[in-house]
Image (cartoon, rainbow, N blue to C red):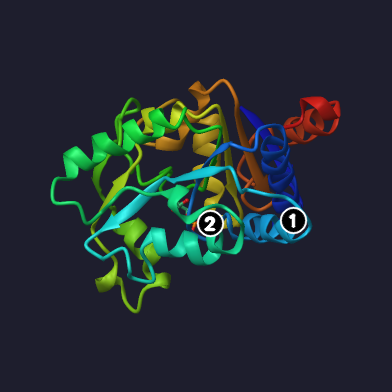
């Protein structure tokens, strides 16, 4: 894993937007893997700004990581609604090429298989953005998730429901179940970029990067990915033992090797 420690979320947004822009320039039909939640918001804003300066997602497509079960797609907190309002409705990507698992499906196992197949049929995700939960989840693969899992239903931990209660009027409104890409699905993306900001993520980041490969910290599965970057601000990187090494190695890299 490449670990990059930057001073703040603005620097992270610029670096990650650069990586996205480079890929879309090189291949306009890039398949984007998108995360929801707070962590990617500045990145999306930076990409929206670049679109008004000429960057185009007109030939790209996008797959979301996950979706709640128990609220309709039209709910303002469904991940499909959130990604549209925060990002894809503000760029020139075609709305019919923004895909998410359907949490309203009658047959959840069939929908799960369909979603994995849809990603594969699109040629696989070229660049996957991830946040990390305070309990170490990526997507909604909570602790205990199989490291080889495929898209499927998961139950949220109380910690995750509590963390996400800020988006709802009360914790009682936070759904208990989700459909999420599995860890095995996520590992198939060609490039994975995990971003984390704030001290609340420090323990999870340290466990993912420096802890053992373990289903107990699902994000540690990225240790198996040949092309994964973990980009954190100083606070989220504060529990990393080798933080000085990561800082030095990144800043001494030639440009062509960066992200
Ligand atoms: C979102 C997702 C989650 C979040 C994680 C961090 O699609 O899959 O794994 O990335 O819960 O959320 P924030 O960024 O809100 O702290």
Residue nearer the viewer, 224 or 52: 52
**Circle on res. 200:** 2
**Circle on res. 210:** none
Q: Which of the image's four quarters has the C terminus? A: top right
With 119 as the anchor, is 192 left or right in this view? right
**x and y, in percent, of residue 131 in the image:** 51, 48
Identify the residue position indicated by label 1 in the image: 50
Alpha carbon separation for disc pair 1 and 2 = 30 Å
Q: Which of the image's four quarters has the N terminus? A: top right
Mark 2 lies on a secondary structure that is helix
Q: Are marks 1 and 2 in contact (CB under 8 Å)?
A: no
Residue nearer the viewer, 175 or 86: 86
Residue nearer the viewer, 1 or 182: 182
Residue occupying image coordinates x 35% and y 64%? 162
Q: Count neighbours of disc 1 (C-alpha within 10 A) and say few if under 14, some if 14 to 19, many if 20 or more.
A: some
- Ligand 1 has an atom within 8 Å of the beta carbon of the residue at disc 2: yes
**x and y, in percent, of residue 24 in the image:** 67, 39
């Amino acid at each position: 894993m490449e670990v990059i420690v930057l001073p703040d979320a603005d620097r992270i947004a610029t670096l990650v937007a650069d990586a996205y822009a480079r890929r879309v320039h090189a291949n306009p039909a890039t398949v984007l893997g998108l995360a929801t939640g707070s962590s990617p918001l500045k990145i999306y804003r930076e990409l929206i700004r670049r679109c008004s300066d000429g960057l185009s997602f007109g030939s790209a497509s996008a797959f979301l990581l996950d979706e709640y079960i128990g609220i309709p797609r039209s709910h303002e907190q469904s991940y499909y609604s959130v990604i549209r309002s925060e990002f894809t409705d503000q760029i020139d990507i075609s709305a019919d090429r923004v895909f998410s698992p359907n949490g309203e499906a009658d047959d959840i196992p069939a929908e799960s298989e369909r979603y994995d197949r849809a990603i594969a049929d699109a040629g696989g995700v070229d660049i996957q953005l991830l946040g990390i939960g305070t309990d170490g989840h990526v997507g909604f693969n909570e602790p205990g998730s199989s490291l080889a899992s495929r898209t499927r239903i998961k139950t949220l931990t109380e910690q995750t429901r509590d963390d996400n209660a800020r988006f709802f009027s009360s914790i009682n409104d936070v759904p208990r179940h989700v459909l999420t890409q599995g860890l095995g699905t996520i590992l198939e993306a060609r490039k994975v970029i995990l971003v984390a900001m704030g001290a609340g993520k420090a323990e999870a980041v340290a466990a993912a990067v420096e802890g053992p490969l373990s289903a107990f910290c699902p994000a540690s599965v990225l240790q198996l990915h040949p092309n994964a970057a973990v980009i954190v601000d100083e606070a989220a990187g504060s529990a990393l033992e080798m933080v000085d090494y990561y800082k030095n190695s990144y800043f001494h890299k030639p440009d062509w090797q960066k992200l």
